[in-house]
Image: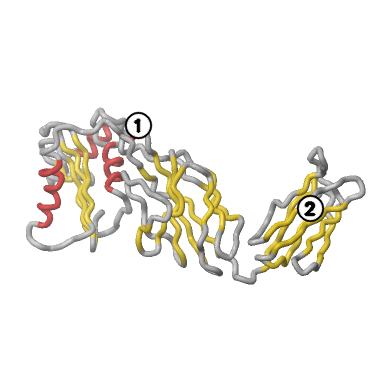
Amino acid sequence: MDAHGGWIATARDLVRLLTAVDAFPSRPDVLSPATIQIMTTPSATNAGYAKGWSVNPAGTWWHGGSLDGSYSWMVRTSSQFSSQVAWAVIMNKRTEAAGFQNAASNLGFGNCVNSTTTFPTHDLFDVPTQNASAMNFSNITSNSMTVNWTNGNGDGRVLIMRSGGAPNKFPLDGTDYNPQQDLGEGNIIVYSGTGGGASVSDLTTNTNYQFRLFEYKKNANTGNNALYQLAGAANGSQNTLSANASVTVRGRVLSGNGRGVAGARVSLTNANGETRMTLTNPFGYYRFMQTAAGGTYTFNISHKRHTFAPQVLTVTGEINDLNFTAQ
């Protein structure tokens, strides 16, 4: 927070840190009372400064930060006010103009703290502690794809997509989002919900898309406000296929009891009547590589002991689970 280095944090993060060392009874401290006393005892040579904190006899501790383009305060006020309060202010501006520092500090010391007599009972620190993970992609075509993930411990999540670069917009606490909502600078909400995947369509051929997934809590404890975990969001990147792309179709041939059928003949026939064939391996798996995307194909299975129904399918992208079960 000082000129020799900076922290990357939200105002909520700063307050969360402060409430962990404020010696107030509202939340457990991570430091012992003795350590907090040492931390906030003024220096023998400067009665207004302790170990990293500016202090005064009234029991107020504070620390200000100033880097080019930003200005911040984090403050613990004592019971001289109506309540024991920890607060933080972060601004995206810094100026040397007369009165700026006092005006910034008065956002908390004056207007906010002194004029507030009651506080909400819900918990605005209650963000998810486990992010979604394992983002991956399937059903990739020239204009669509499916984004999959493993859910974290939030009540829901929002997925932001951006073409040609990583998403650079973030969800705001207390705000609900809808699919197709434009956040600006190419950032689009493509999913908002509780599931573990989303189908994204109307994409551009042969284009890179990048995604970032944010977990949120929204329940009675948060006052029904959506509170987002911004740190460590799951992310991923995927290109759509070119218009004439070749893809792989793979799957498995199974007996009626679910066992893989070895040596089954799998044929793929296109609309022109051209046929390709392959045999399943000892575990029943097969694959066709270099299959033209966008074509409609008939798949047939032949085996001396089993009968299978054919399938007709338009192949728009990679297929990993085109399975056949004996009748």
Residue 203: x %, y % from top left: 51, 63
Graded by Cα atoms within 10 Å as few (under 14), some (14 to 19) or many (20 or more), the crowding at tag 2 reads few
- For image coordinates 13% across by 63% down, the residue present is 96
The residue under label 1 is which amino acid type? Ala
Residue 293: x %, y % from top left: 66, 65
Q: Is residue 221 left or right of residue 191?
A: left
- Snapshot quadrant of residue 122: top left
- For image coordinates 83% across by 62% down, the residue present is 277
Labelled disc at residue 310: 2
Could you tell me how many numbered marks the image carries?
A: 2
Q: Quadrant of the C terminus?
A: top right
Q: Quadrant of the N terminus?
A: bottom left
Report which residue position mark 1 lands on. 220
Q: Is residue 201 left or right of residue 83?
A: right
Location of residue 53 with respect to 245 vertically, above or below: above
Which residue, as the protein is rendered here, is positioned at the far top?
25
Judge by depth and name the residue closer to the eye, 151 or 4.
151
- For image coordinates 10% across by 44% down, the residue present is 110
Whole-Å distance between the Cαs marked 1 and 2?
A: 52 Å
